[in-house]
Image (cartoon, helix red, strand yellow):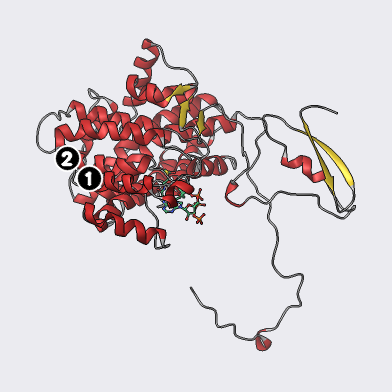
Amino acid sequence: MAHDSIVITDNRTNQTYTLPVKQGTIRAMDLRQIKTGPDDFGLMTYDPAFMNTASCRSSVTFIDGERGILRYRGYPIEVLAEHCTFLEVAYLLLFGELPTESELKNWVHEITHHTMLHETTKKFMEGFRHEAHPMAMLVSTIAALSTVYPQAREIHDAENRLLQIKRLIGKMPSIAAMSYRHSLGFPYVYPDNDLTYTENFMNMLWKMVEPKYVANPVLARALDILFILHADHEQNCSANVMRSVGSSQADPYLSTAAAAAALSGPLHGGANEEVLKMLDEIGSKENVPAYVKKVKEGHGKLMGFGHRVYKNYDPRAKIIKWTAEQVFEVTGRNRRLDIALELERIALEDEYFIQRKLYPNVDFYSGIIYQAMGFRPEMFTVLFAIPRTAGWLAQWQELLNDSDQKIARPRQIYTGHDVREFVPMTKRASMEVNAG
Ligand code: CMC
C-alpha cells in the first residue's frame, strides 16, 4: 500500500478505498467513486465557506495563521515593508521575482504612464450623486473601464493581459481620488508623472491651487507601507471572487470590479471603516470594559478582531502599529489610538478572546492612521482596494495559467421538494410571506 495514502472504509457497503494524499490533501473528485450502488452519484464533501477546502494551488502568498507568518513569493512581509516600495512588491507578486534596478525603472515608468483616465470615465463619475459611497463609485467605475478597453476580453493573449494589468494598477489611484473629490464637489486633479505612486495619489486627492503638489515624505512612505501590507492575502473572500469570476473568462476589469465588491463588505475590507465607528461609539478609554462585556454577551463583534486564518497576532497589525507612530509624529496623535490600545489590552487578557484566539487584524489600526492622514472613514476600504488590485491580478494570472482550473462551479446538497404537481392559480393558498 502506498505510504502517502489514506484508506476509507464505507460502513454502508463495507467497501474499502485507498486514496492518494498529496501535499496534505485528498482530491475531492477521488471521493466520487465511493458509492452505495450504480444509481448513487458518489460521495461529496460539504464545506460551506470553504473552511477546509483548497480551491487552488498557488505560489503567490504564504500564510501560517498559527504562527502569524505572512510571505509574498517567499519574502517575509516585515522585510518587504522595510526595504521595498509598493510598485516593487506589485512586480514581485505578479512576476514571482523582485525586479532588478532597470526592470523596476521600466515598470514604474509603465505604471506611471497608465494613470490617466479616459475623459468619458470622468463624465461617468460625474453621474454619481455627491453622497454616493466612494467604494460603490470605485466598483462601478472599474467595471465601466471594460467599456473603454473592449480588447481586454482577449484574456488568453499574455501581452494584452499585461497591458490591462498595468492599466488597472495605474488607474486605481486615479479612480479612487476622483471618487473622493467627487464626494466633496472639488474639481478632479490629473496625475503628475514626476511623482511616485503614493505621492501622485496624494496629489490627486489633496492638490488645491498650488502649482505643484508636494507630499509629506513621511506620510507618503507610510501610505506606501500600508499598500505593501494590503497587496495580497492568498485565498481571501475577494481573491476567491476574482478567481471565481475570472474562471468564467470574464475580462479583468469586470473580474476586478467583482473582487472589489466582495472587499467592500464589513466582514472583509469594510471592517476598517467599522472599526472607526466602533471606536467613536465607545468614546473613551473608561467605556472599553463595558463595550467588551456587551460583545461577550453576544451584542455585536469587536470589529478589527479575529481572522479566519490567523489564530495569532496578524503580522500586518504589528507593522501598522509601528507605522502609526511615524505618522502621528507628523499629524499629532489620533485620540482614538488610546481607546484602541486599551481595547486591545483588555481583549487580549480576556478568556473569551484568548479561548477563541481572537487578535487584532490588519483593519484594527489602519483606519486610525488613515484618519490622522486626513482620510474620511468612507475612503478606508478604497485605500485597501488600490494595492489589493496587484494581488487580485496575480491570482487571476495564476488561475489562467493553471491547467488544473476550470470554471468554478460548486455542488450543493439539495434540500427542496421532490417533484410536485402544478397548482393552478385558483387553487393556491396564500403563504403570508414575511420579508424578514
Ligand atoms: N468579536 C467577537 N467575537 C468574535 C469576533 C469578533 N471580532 N470574531 C469571531 N468571534 C467569535 C465568534 O462569535 C465565534 O464564537 P463562538 O465560537 O462562541 O460562536 C468564534 O469567535 C469563531 O468565529 P467565526 O465567526 O466562526 O470565525 P470566522 O473565521 O468565520 O470569521 C471573521 C472571521 C474575520 C469574519 C470574524 O472574526 C469577524 O467577523 N471579525 C470582525 C470583522 C473584521 O475585523 N474583519 C476583517 C478581517 S481581516 C481583513 C480582511 O479579511 O479583509
Q: Nearer the viewer, residue 368 or 175?
A: 368
The amino acid on which the numbered mark 2 sits, given as a three-letter code, is Arg
Position of residue 34 relative to residue 132, above or below, is: above
In what element is the residue under mark 2?
A: loop
Q: Quadrant of residue 114?
A: top left
Q: Which residue is mark 2?
A: 333
Q: Residue furthest left?
A: 210
Position of residue 290 relative to residue 339, above or below, is: below
Residue at x 90%, y 53% (from the top left corner): 37
Q: Residue furthest bottom?
A: 426
Q: Residues within 10 Å of mark 1 (few under 14, many from 20)?
A: some
Q: Quadrant of residue 278?
A: bottom left
Q: Which residue is mark 1?
A: 338
Position of residue 362 measured from the top left corner of the image (x, y, whole percent)? 37, 40
Q: Residues within 10 Å of mark 2 (few under 14, many from 20)?
A: some
Position of residue 402 measured from the top left corner of the image (x, y, whole percent)? 63, 30
Q: Nearer the viewer, residue 135 or 311?
A: 311
**The CB of the residue at mark 2 lies under 8 Å from ligand 1:** no
Position of residue 241 measured from the top left corner of the image (x, y, whole percent)? 52, 44
* Residue 327 seen in the figure: yes
The amino acid on which the numbered mark 1 sits, given as a three-letter code, is Asp
Badge 1 or badge 2: first in the primary sequence: 2
* Residue 117 seen in the figure: no
Residue at x 43%, y 50% (from the top left corner): 351
| Distance CA(mark 1)–CA(mark 2) | 9 Å
**The CB of the residue at mark 1 lies under 8 Å from ligand 1:** no
User: What numbered label is drawn on residue 51?
Assistant: none
How many marks overall? 2
Residue 81 lies left or right of residue 417; in this view the side is left
Whether residues under marks 1 and 2 lie with C-beta atoms below 8 angstroms apart, the answer is yes
Q: In which quadrant is the N terminus drawn? A: top right
Residue 57 lies left or right of residue 228; in this view the side is right
